[in-house]
Image (spheres, rainbow, N blue to C red):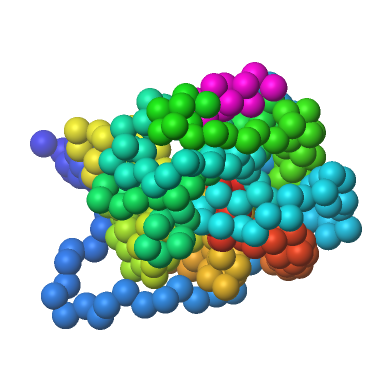
């Protein structure tokens, strides 16, 4: 064999080896990033911190079928939710005249909680609006949901004036009256209903206020280079205090008090989380979300969301954008933060502070 043949064979082998090495490198570079192996000595998760890269904001109004919703406004000088006088009745129990139509039910005598429960409407809704029944407890003097073994000297039944599906309308009010009357008849009570046209008008004005002061914020975190596996996303989010949600591909940052809405939500492709081999699923973006009226401002939800986005972007080699993929700067976030403070102040002035039971009901 000539020296030329040997040289060509060696050169061909080197080229082949180079191609194999390049393809292997590219495959590893483009493979979804995997979570780190568990470390028994690893410290407990720590709170997130604000990085150098400015996080960004994407604002989504809440679309409502059949009832046009507005882009969230941040104007503390908007008119009050209703020009009609708000009922002066003292706020009692869970029902509240600020956001509910309340029909008192008078009784000739005491009614047991068992009898009240048996008389409850089969469905606790009038159209898309929740219906609730409360009784005045004989012993405590407090309004509460009827309970077995208790006795009640009066009842009140209410329907919510508005929620994110829109305002209470005439058909829903009529359905409420039918349910309330049937309940009152079953316990030998006499209901007193407010004037329908007045309540429907109040519902529309409350809905207008809620529409103008409803906001949902969202950050989109996108991978710069290599995609992420579900396990990689979950591990990095868990380090910042996120826990798994019920739906695959959903995580949440919970509040200290159980049963309240999460401070921040995190979501990615559900199909990637449900894949036969999730480690091979490629995730190129995830979303952080905040439902502003649902979370108490004392939780610092917006600041924590910014910190979380910046930390994840730094640790996972990502960038934070709006829904259209446009980078938003920290200066823009500062402006949005200032607008949010005005929104919080406006909700406080209307006795609907963010995160309160009334606000959670109205903005649901």
The quarter of the picture where residue 30 lies is top left
In this image, 337 relative to 284: left or right? right
Observer able to see residue 129: yes
Return the residue found at the far top. Answer: 171
Question: Residue placed at 45% from the left, 73% from the top?
Answer: 48
Q: Residue at x 24, y 63 (%)?
A: 36
Provide the residue span drawn in magenta: 170-180
Q: Which quadrant holds residue 141?
A: bottom left
Furthest residue to the left? 1
User: Residue 302 at what x, y percent from top left?
Assistant: 60, 65
In the image, residue 159 above or below residue 185: below
The quadrant in which the N terminus is found is: top left
Compared across the picture, whether 135 is left or right of 102 comes to left
**In the image, is residue 9 above or below residue 197?**
below
Inspect the magenta stretch and tell me whether residue 250 lies in it. no
Along the horizontal axis of the image, is 155 left or right of 113?
A: right
Closer to the camera in the image, 349 or 174: 174
Residue at the far front: name it. 108
């Amino acid at each position: 064999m000539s020296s030329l043949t040997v040289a060509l064979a060696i050169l061909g082998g080197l080229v082949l080896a180079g191609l194999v090495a390049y393809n292997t490198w590219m495959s590893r570079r483009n493979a979804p990033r995997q979570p780190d192996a568990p470390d028994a000595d690893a410290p407990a998760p720590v709170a997130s911190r604000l990085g150098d890269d400015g996080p960004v904001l994407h604002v989504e109004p809440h679309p409502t079928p059949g009832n046009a919703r507005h882009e969230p406004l941040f104007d503390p000088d908007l008119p009050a939710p209703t020009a009609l006088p708000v009922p002066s009745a003292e706020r009692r129990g869970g029902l509240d005249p600020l956001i509910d139509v309340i029909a008192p039910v008078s009784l000739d005598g005491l009614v047991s909680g068992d009898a009240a429960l048996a008389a409850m409407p089969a469905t606790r809704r009038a159209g898309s609006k929740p219906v609730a029944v409360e009784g005045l407890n004989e012993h405590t003097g407090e309004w509460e949901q009827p309970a077995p073994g208790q006795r009640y000297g009066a009842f009140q039944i209410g329907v919510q004036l508005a929620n994110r599906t829109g305002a209470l309308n005439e058909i829903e009010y009529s359905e409420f009256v039918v349910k309330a009357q049937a309940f009152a008849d079953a316990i030998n009570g006499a209901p007193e209903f407010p004037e329908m046209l007045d309540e429907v008008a109040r519902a529309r004005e409350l809905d207008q206020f809620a529409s103008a002061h409803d906001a949902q914020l969202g950050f989109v975190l996108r991978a710069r280079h290599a995609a992420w596996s579900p396990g990689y996303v979950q591990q990095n989010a868990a380090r910042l205090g996120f826990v798994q949600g019920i739906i695959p591909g959903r995580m949440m940052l919970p509040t200290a008090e159980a049963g309240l809405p999460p401070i921040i939500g995190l979501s990615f492709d559900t199909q990637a989380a449900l894949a036969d081999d999730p480690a091979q699923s490629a995730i190129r973006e995830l979303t952080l979300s905040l439902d502003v009226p649902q979370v108490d401002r004392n939780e610092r939800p917006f600041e924590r969301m910014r910190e979380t986005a910046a930390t994840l972007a730094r640790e996972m080699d990502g960038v934070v954008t709006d829904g259209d993929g446009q980078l938003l700067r920290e200066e823009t976030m500062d402006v949005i933060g200032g607008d949010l403070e005005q929104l919080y102040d406006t909700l406080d002035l209307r006795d609907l502070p963010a995160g309160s039971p009334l606000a959670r009901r109205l903005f649901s």
